[in-house]
Amino acid sequence: MMILVIRFGGSNEQLVNYSKFELTLKLNINAFVLAVLIIFLFFFGGVLIRWLTSKG
């Protein structure tokens, strides 16, 4: 939606700038999600190993 608004109400230069910004934003979000997933996996794995060793 925002890209269409910029395309109709601005120059191509603005569109390119917005696309770059959107790309970096997406990359940052992906990196953040990946980091959270890795931390969660390490935490969950540690808890699981601790639980298994305490039971066994």
Image (spheres, rainbow, N blue to C red):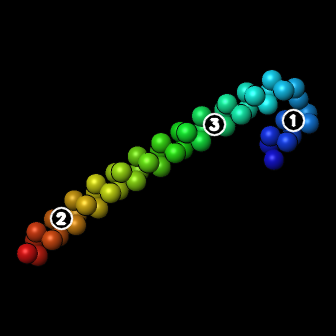
The residue lying at 34 percent from left, 51 percent from top is 39
Name which quarter of the figure residue 56 lies in: bottom left
Which numbered disc flags the more N-terminal residue, 1 or 2? 1
Task: Please state the total of marks drawn on the protein image.
Answer: 3
Q: Residues within 10 Å of mark 1 (few under 14, many from 20)?
A: some
The residue lying at 60 percent from left, 34 percent from top is 24
Q: Residues within 10 Å of mark 2 (few under 14, many from 20)?
A: few
Name which quarter of the figure residue 8 lies in: top right
* Whether residue 47 is situated above or below residue 23 in the rendered picture: below
The residue lying at 29 percent from left, 62 percent from top is 44
Which numbered disc flags the more N-terminal residue, 3 or 1? 1
The residue lying at 73 percent from left, 27 percent from top is 17
In the picture, measured across the screen, residue 52 lies left or right of residue 26, that is left
Amino acid at circle 3: Leu
Q: Most extreme residue toward the right, as rendered?
A: 8
Mark 1: secondary structure: helix
Q: Return the x and y of residue 37 as percentages of the image width and height.
A: 40, 53
Where is mark 3, residue-wise? Answer: 23
Q: Residues within 10 Å of mark 3 (few under 14, many from 20)?
A: few
Amino acid at circle 2: Ile
Mark 2: secondary structure: helix
Amino acid at circle 1: Arg
Where is mark 2, residue-wise? Answer: 49
Where is mark 1, residue-wise? Answer: 7
Q: Return the x and y of residue 54 as percentages of the image width and height.
A: 10, 71
